[in-house]
């Protein structure tokens, strides 16, 4: 909450909202520049705000399709140090899949078992050993389970969570996939496809036209997702 004062809105003289600079405290302390018009003067002011707010190292995430913003970032001394693909799949109709025998999916309104969720995330991301009390990061992520905009799909066998896909959707055309995890001994059965497709289908039922993920993994490409753009991590070091 104390970081909210770093966010700033940009308006025309008539009060119309045309831009926002948003500070993301969860991932590498990075900034997002959001704008409804491509105006050099506006974007220049937004970039200047970031450089003044972050006097040491400023990090801005920008889509390469936003050519004017990327050009102005380069002119302002920012360097694109990392590219990440945006993969997408259209949702004109429900995506079809088959679950292996003995597995089932949780109902949309079912109660989530917090311990089972911790376990599928812990083991699904290849952590070994005994799961201890949640770290601060995991405890923060647990709060996502209470958010209605977070669609939660689990593949379950014998009462245990075997795979999970989360999808963020809060209206509009686009749903965002994150995270996807399958417990090692349940891999190779098509569970990853099943939970991703089902989560996307549930987002479609709420109005989504497409689902996206920031990833270069072949797993998503095998699901029919194609690259729509790339997002760069633009870094400016004042030293």
Image (cartoon, rainbow, N blue to C red):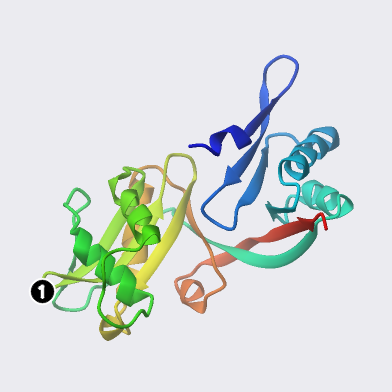
Lateral position of residue 63 relative to residue 67, left or right: left
For disc 1, the marked residue is 158
Residue drawn 31% across and 76% down? 123
Estimate the x, y position of residue 177 in percent, counting from the top left.
Answer: 44, 59
Q: Viewer-proximal residue, 232 or 56?
A: 56
Q: How many marks?
A: 1
SS category of the residue bearing label 1: loop
> Dot 1: within a 10 Å radius of its alpha carbon, few (fewer than 14), some, or many (20 or more) residues?
few
Lateral position of residue 48 relative to residue 145, left or right: right
Estimate the x, y position of residue 170 in percent, counting from the top left.
Answer: 42, 41
Q: Quadrant of the C terminus?
A: bottom right
Estimate the x, y position of residue 175 in percent, counting from the top left.
Answer: 45, 51
Estimate the x, y position of residue 146 in percent, counting from the top left.
Answer: 28, 46
Is residue 168 visible in the rendered structure shown here?
yes
Q: Viewer-proximal residue, 194 or 77?
A: 77
Task: Name the quadrant containing residue 6.
Answer: top right
Residue drawn 37% across and 49% down? 203
Lateral position of residue 90 relative to residue 155, left or right: right
Task: Name the quadrant containing residue 238.
Answer: bottom right
Residue drawn 20% across and 55% down? 112
Q: Viewer-proximal residue, 231 or 191?
A: 231
Residue drawn 36% across and 71% down? 181
């Amino acid at each position: 909450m104390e970081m909210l004062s770093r966010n700033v809105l940009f308006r025309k003289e008539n009060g119309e909202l045309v831009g926002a600079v948003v500070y993301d405290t969860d991932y590498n302390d990075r900034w997002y520049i959001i704008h409804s018009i491509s105006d050099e003067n506006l974007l220049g002011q937004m970039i200047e705000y970031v450089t003044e707010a972050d006097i040491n190292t400023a990090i801005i995430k920008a889509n390469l399709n936003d050519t004017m913003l990327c050009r102005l970032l380069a002119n302002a001394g920012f360097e694109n140090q990392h590219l990440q693909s945006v993969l997408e799949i259209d949702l004109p109709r429900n995506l079809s899949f088959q679950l292996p025998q003995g597995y089932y999916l949780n109902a949309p309104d079912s109660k989530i078992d917090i311990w089972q969720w911790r376990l599928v995330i812990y083991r699904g991301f290849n952590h070994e050993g005994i799961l201890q009390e949640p770290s601060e990061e995991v405890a923060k992520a647990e709060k996502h389970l209470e958010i209605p905009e977070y669609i939660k799909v689990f593949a379950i066998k014998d009462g245990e969570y075997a795979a999970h896909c989360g999808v963020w959707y809060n209206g509009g055309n686009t749903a965002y996939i994150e995270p996807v995890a399958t417990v090692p001994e349940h891999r190779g059965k098509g569970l990853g496809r099943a939970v991703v497709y089902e989560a996307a289908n549930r987002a479609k039922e709420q109005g989504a036209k497409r689902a996206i993920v920031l990833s270069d993994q072949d797993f998503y490409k095998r699901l029919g997702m194609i690259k729509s753009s790339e997002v760069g991590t633009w870094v400016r070091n004042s030293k």
